[in-house]
Amino acid sequence: MNEIVMPRVTGRLNHSLPANIITPIGQSISLDKGETITYNCTYTPKSASVDFGYIDSDSVFCCLSCTTGSINKSIKIEEPGQYTLAIRNNESYSVRVTGTVRY
Amino acid sequence: MKATLSLSELRKTKGISQEELTEQLGVARQTIGRWEHGEFSPSAENLRKLSQVFDIPAGVLLKGGPLPLETAEAPPPDVPAEETPAPVEISASRPKHRRLWLLVAALLLAAGIGVGALFLWGRHVKTVPSSQLERSVIDDSMIGDSIELFPLE
């Protein structure tokens, strides 16, 4: 039986991300199996390569790559644990990200 | 091509006077005279009547060629052999307009469905299992300053 997991937090992004760095979002959070992290964002310049995801407790950055200037995807957690939402700017220049994050 | 007929000879042979011929054909005596003198030719209708009066085929009354188009009197109105009603021009404008409106309505409906589908598809969020994410081991040097989410307005 599928359970509907409601997001606990929704926040707004309007930040400039430094070049070639992973920018964590807030503190680490505890997520259970089946919970989702939803990124609904756009960024400029659109041509930049930006990765949206999280850092797990093993210091592994898990992400969805985006090169189109926008993202509207959810990540479904398959292992319960501590996670820190994070965004990586792969460019040598800063990128402005706006949108919402739900988890 | 004018008709040439020995009308006077035929008439006299049949023992019919000009007055009697005018009565049977319903034309003026002067008209009969003009026919006989070759000034004018009878109309197709009168030629038919003459053939009946003299009991001679109309073609025999003519000398070479079809019925003439030049006649002494005004050509009779065209009366078809069988009166057929003029084709009723069914107004196609109304059914054509109805089809056009149906086509426009169908196109609008299809466009609305298409827009709605695109809208719903756009709102649909694709979910990716965490096992399918790109993974890279990082260290602290790759991590910058943390940011905080703003509250929703």
Image: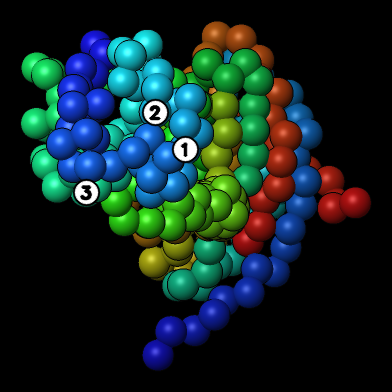
Left of B152 or right of it: where is B141?
A: left
- Looking at the picture, how far across and down is residue A50, in whole percent? 52, 27
**Circle 1 residue:** B27
**Circle 2 residue:** B32
**Circle 2 marks a residue in which chain?**
B
**Circle 3 residue:** B52
Distance between the alpha carbons at the discs numbered 3 and 2? 16 Å
**Circle 1 marks a residue in which chain?**
B
Callout 2 environment at 10 Å: few (<14), some (14 to 19), or many (20+)? many
Looking at the image, residue A98 lies above or below residue A74:
above
Q: Residue at x 65, y 68 (%)?
A: A7
> Which quarter of the figure is the C terminus of chain A placed in?
bottom right
Distance between the alpha carbons at the discs numbered 3 and 1? 15 Å
Answer with the quarter of the image where residue A21 lies. Answer: top right
Colouring method of the image: rainbow
Q: Say which amino acid is labelled 3.
A: Gln
Closest to the observer: B85 or A30? B85
> Which quarter of the figure is the N terminus of chain A placed in?
bottom left
Q: Is mark 2 on a helix, strand or loop?
A: helix
Q: Which residue is drawn at 83% across and 46% down?
A: B150
Closest to the observer: B151 or B6? B6
Q: Is mark 3 on a helix, strand or loop?
A: helix
Residues at discs 1 and 2 in contact (Cβ within 8 Å): yes
- Looking at the picture, how far across and down is residue A86, in whole percent? 58, 41
